[in-house]
Amino acid sequence: MVNGRGAEGQGSVGARFPRPETSEMNTKEMMVTEKKRTGILGVGKYLPEKVLTNADLEKMVDTSDEWIVTRTGIKERRIAAKDEAASDMAVKAARCALNNAGLKPEDIDLIIVATITPDMFFPSTACQVQHKLGIKKVPAFDISVACSGFIYGLAIADQFIKGGMYKRALVIASEKLSAITDWEDRSTCILFGDGAGAAVLSQVDKGGILGVNLGADGDKGDLLQLPAGGSRMPASKKTVEDKLHTIKMEGNTLFKHAVKIMADAALAVANPLGLKGDDIDLIIPHQANLRILNALAKRMGVDPAKKVYLNIEKYGNMSAASSAVALCEAVEEGRIKRGDTILMDAFGGGLTWGALIIKW
Ligand code: COA
């Protein structure tokens, strides 16, 4: 039926469904919207066993625990095993989320994986996850949005569920950043780690996603990139020698953009809902740098110690997986309770950003 609607829509770009006119109809529409919100039924995570501490990094590059902790807030990060790829971690996080939701893999009818470290270019990591979970036929695709990927994934699933096309979506963020890190570059290797987080989404009667703000700024793509391995610069002996298959970052410039982007995205989603810093019970941010998150809290007018969930100290920056794992741990630790208003907020390579408010 939805496909039919799409076909009808061809050639009628810009067409809009008529809006209800009377106040009575507006109330009814609001009630329907309220009923059809998308919520999170379960969350899950997976962190690889191996811990790489700042002391370990001191032996690898010219750095110190003191510098890393002061400049970033990171004390250690997880590193996936050699034979452990993004889909392996994704499947473990997904099983955890399904278990938390009390559902089975066959209950899922949409799979979205956010990753910039897919097992390979194709087939997608989502297809491999589908196969490993033994789910048949359902659509599965990857999204490449860097650190904002989990929030984009939630927003996409929300649209599919609200539109009625799918009932239960699995949104996973899985990253093996250790595979694309230059372990001789002290300005980047101290930041990143590996891990995966997942959420199961469905229509809910109470609460759910209240609003989303997504965006991108492609002209700042050069600030954070993996230059080689794509169609512009296919892999060659030279690209490997020049380490062009590892993350290149202009950390300082990114830092300044990050604070503004995250604050603007948060306000862009909160303001139309009439929500202020005080109305938010917990902010689950992308864990890029403790100083960025403290600056964000200041701009939002909230106490970072009380209202910003932090696990950067344990895991570093896991790109899209950071906010997914943070959400899962906040639930596990009882920091999120029924009825709480949660703001998720991320920025990353692209540049991209995403902020989402959900009533739990
Ligand atoms: N250990 C010790 N010194 C280091 C170092 C390390 N690991 N990395 C860099 N330095 C040095 C630099 O060489 C520089 O030395 P110099 O002054 O002699 O040239 C000095 O520390 C300051 O470097 P700078 O890059 O200005 O530091 P910073 O305060 O901006 O911190 C980051 C660097 C990367 C921690 C910070 O910029 C950051 O977190 N940026 C955002 C990155 C990010 O979020 N990326 C992902 C986006 S999702």
Image (cartoon, helix red, strand yellow):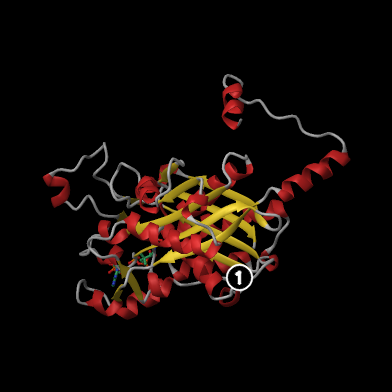
Asked if the residue at label 1 sits under 8 Å from ligand 1, the reply is: no
Residue receiving disc 1: 336
Q: Quadrant of the C terminus?
A: bottom right
Query: Between 187 and 252, which is closer to the camera in this rendering?
Result: 187
Residue 180 at what x, y percent from top left?
27, 56
Query: Between 323 and 5, which is closer to the camera in this rendering?
Result: 5
Residue 320 figure quarter: bottom left
**Residue at 65% of width from left, 56% of height from top?**
208
Image: 347 above or below 292: above
Left or right: 34 as drawn, with respect to 93: right
Amino acid under label 1?
Ile
Q: Quadrant of the N terminus?
A: top right
Query: Between 153 and 291, which is closer to the camera in this rendering?
Result: 153
Viewer can see residue 148: no
Q: Quadrant of ligand 1?
A: bottom left
**Residue at 52% of width from left, 46% of height from top?**
215
Image: 67 above or below 44: below
Q: How many numbered discs?
A: 1
Viewer can see residue 159: yes
**Residue at 59% of width from left, 65% of height from top?**
299
Residue 127 figure quarter: top left
**Residue at 44% of width from left, 58% of height from top?**
94
